[in-house]
Amino acid sequence: MAERELIKTTCPRDCYDGCGIVVTKRDGEIRKVLGDPDHPVSRGALCGKCAVAYNGAWRDPNQRLTTPLKRVGAKGEGKFTAISWDEAIADIAARTKAIVAKSGPASVLSTHYTGTCAVVATNFPNRFFNRLGATEADPDTVCNAAGYTALELTIGTALVGFDPRTAKDANCILVWGCNPSASAPHAHKYWLPESPAKKIVVDPVRTESAQAADLHLQLRPGSDAALAYAMLHVLIRDRLIDHAFIDAHVVGFDEVAAIAAKCDAHWGEAQTGVPVADIERAAQLYGAGPSLLWLGQGLQRQPQGGNIMRACAMLPAATGNIGKPGAGLYYLNGKSATRNMELGVLSAPQLRQGPAPKVSHMDLADHVMDADTTQALFCWNMNIAASVPNQKKLRQALKREDLFSVVIDLFQTDTADLADYVLPAASFLEFDDLAGSYFHLSLGPQAKAMEPLGQSLPNSEIFRRLARAMGYSEPELYESDAALIAYQLDKFKPGLTFDQLKRVGTLPVSDDVVILHRDLKFATPSGKIELASDQAVKLGLPRTAQPTVDKPPSQGRLRLLSPAGKWLLNSSYANDARIEQLMGGDCVILNPAEAERRQLHDGQRVTLANASATLELVLKIQDIVPDGTALTYKTRWPKMGGQGINVNALNPGLRADMNNSTALHGVEVEIAAA
Ligand SMILES: Nc1nc2c(c(=O)[nH]1)N[C@H]1C(S)=C(S)[C@@H](COP(=O)(O)OP(=O)(O)OC[C@H]3O[C@@H](n4cnc5c(=O)[nH]c(N)nc54)[C@H](O)[C@@H]3O)O[C@H]1N2
Ligand SMILES: Nc1nc2c(c(=O)[nH]1)N[C@H]1C(S)=C(S)[C@@H](COP(=O)(O)OP(=O)(O)OC[C@H]3O[C@@H](n4cnc5c(=O)[nH]c(N)nc54)[C@H](O)[C@@H]3O)O[C@H]1N2
Ligand code: SF4
Ligand SMILES: [Mo]
């Protein structure tokens, strides 16, 4: 009889769900990677994309990088030769030392993000770059940095939301600028339907989550602040305001109420396209409470994304919907902020002796293009050539013959094609770590289920080897994964060991529902929710959220949205053949009236063009987007489509109003028959 072994592990992708996984092994070989039936989120099934990719490309030695590679052809030609780890590490350290000696440590750039969100694999390599004194491409600027600033100004943190388990106590769940049906598939399938609350979705797109909701407010992109003000107007008009809460815990309500006085529902309809009756119904449902407000990350990827987040945060402040059962405002639940962990120590900031220069991903292409600022680039946990704006220029910059570049990944991505050295990373199935979602208040084991494929290594081990070759002596650079894991686990639950966690799988932070913000002490200068903020003024921002909307696209252009799709996780899985098949061709969606006005028909090839690039896609006509809006999804590998670019070539690096963060949903394009 074949010997069967089951291993409980956790999906470490950048995803709200944080699914529990069961790996089935027979005679020492992995047979299946499936959802853990005992796990409260996955309940026996992974999302479609992971179910395919974890049993496909992620374990396929023909797809995975299995040895270190050194470039032999011209930059970008894609010609590499396999070398040993010793040779790769020695070469990289020698080049890096020479660059640091000649041009200073800040000429070394580290660009990284959340290719894995596992605790050690995401954070530990920062120790190396802190010791080196490298420049960092500010990670969150490609994703959610505007929202961080907006919520820090308003409630003092962006990392403490609500415990999803409190949905049983809610009468209303308002999902604003988030699409769980793609980005949090289990929240869409179970969490939302199982709550007794009425669901309201605010999204320009009629997503599956919007279709399933009791009410869908289909506003024009970038008009959310006006919608929030119109809802506040109705809340005040209908006496749904919690004055006792405001008196005790809110600063600046009178200032925003004075603005809201001019923003009645008719004004709101004109500004946003949402019918008066729907604005009123949404305000009344939300105001009756208790109500949860989920602010998506898509919401703040707008030219006025920060302002929009501040405007939406007026609603819980005005109605006291925070810090009690069934209420709260969620953007992200940080593991340090909500699970007692200390992720900060994983980066050992004390190893940095000099300044900590940062550059926004919006400026990455220009920064890398400039030989005076950048001599070396390390890219890990990230596929910049696919996912960062100003794609054509970035590609050109990465082709600089005098740029020394190292890419660490599981796969030969477009970014890896442009590297001098490519280092093979082990997958989450191949080393121990900790993982958990940024929604649910739990933590799971990432348990090693097989040996690293080929010669691949976990990020942590790669950077320990690099540190040694650089001659660094600080002990933090050599701490073992086991020690790092044990430290974090003990913070999460004193005394908990990794073996214990592996046996049970995911553990919640507590048995009972946690009421976040229960003490109603907010980490703002006043200790209250600041709807009017002196800190904002110091940053050059308005004192309060403004009831403004984006201008409609100019001269017949379309606003192009490119949110999360179902079959890719950012750029990951784009190289899995089965995913490619399931996904179908790369398309752009217009509504029937918009297509007719432009004399375009379903299935035809069209070009999307602006000053940055021209991209060819197949047109689909679907009544799910408003006039003036086009929808496509992020982000195939540029080299897969035959055009060498993807949607991010159309984005010149638009930035939001806060924190040099991305405004990728603000891109405008012309459309024409191809
Ligand atoms: N048009 C458009 N562009 C977008 C977005 C959008 O909505 N629209 N979203 C933006 C957002 S929110 C994000 S977060 C970015 C993310 O964009 P990407 O950088 O494309 O993110 P991922 O695909 O999650 O992961 C990046 C790489 O990490 C690798 N990886 C996985 N595990 C490991 C590991 O253990 N070690 C190493 N070294 N590598 C590993 C994967 O193979 C993958 O190639 O894209 C941004 N770009
Ligand atoms: N399947 C899948 N899941 C993912 C990812 C993925 O790529 N694929 N990416 C992961 C990552 S890194 C992240 S950051 C999250 C992001 O996931 P979400 O927080 O859901 O963000 P997005 O997918 O960018 O956009 C969500 C919704 O915002 C809408 N939107 C666009 N513009 C506006 C606007 O002006 N106003 C309003 N109200 N809504 C608007 C879009 O139409 C979209 O339906 O998802 C994670 N999960
Ligand atoms: S990507 Fe998200 S939905 Fe898919 S398996 Fe991982 S945690 Fe679950
Ligand atoms: Mo993201």
Image (cartoon, grey):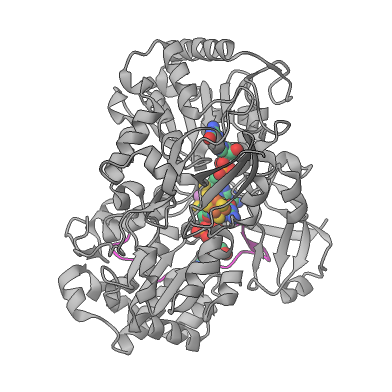
Residue 383 visible in the picture:
no
Report how many numbered discs are placed on residues in the image: 0
Q: Position of residue 20 (x, y in %)?
A: 50, 51
Quadrant for the N terminus in the image: top right
The relative height of residue 10 versus residue 553 in the rendered view (above or below) is: above
Residue located at (46% from left, 83% from top): 279
Residue located at (36% from left, 50% from top): 334
User: Is residue 381 within the magenta segment?
Assistant: no
Q: Is residue 636 left or right of residue 245?
A: right
Q: Position of residue 7 (x, y in %)?
A: 53, 43
Q: Residue furthest front?
A: 1
Residue located at (38% from left, 25% from top): 480
Quarter residue 472 falls in: top left
Quarter residue 379 falls in: top right
Front position in the image: 586 or 432: 432
Q: Which residues are magenta?
A: 542-562
Front position in the image: 271 or 83: 83
Quadrant for the C terminus in the image: bottom right
Front position in the image: 449 or 194: 449
Q: Main secondary structure of the magenta part?
A: loop
Q: Position of residue 298 (x, y in %)?
A: 51, 59
Residue 463 visible in the picture:
yes
The relative height of residue 422 versus residue 194 in the rendered view (above or below) is: above
Q: Is residue 3 left or right of residue 328?
A: right
The relative height of residue 99 versus residue 548 in the rendered view (above or below) is: above
Residue located at (52% from left, 81% from top): 215
Quarter residue 476 falls in: top left
User: Is residue 552 within the magenta segment?
Assistant: yes
Q: Position of residue 473 (x, y in %)?
A: 33, 13
Front position in the image: 282 or 482: 482
Q: Is residue 273 left or right of residue 490?
A: right
The relative height of residue 276 versus residue 381 in the rendered view (above or below) is: below
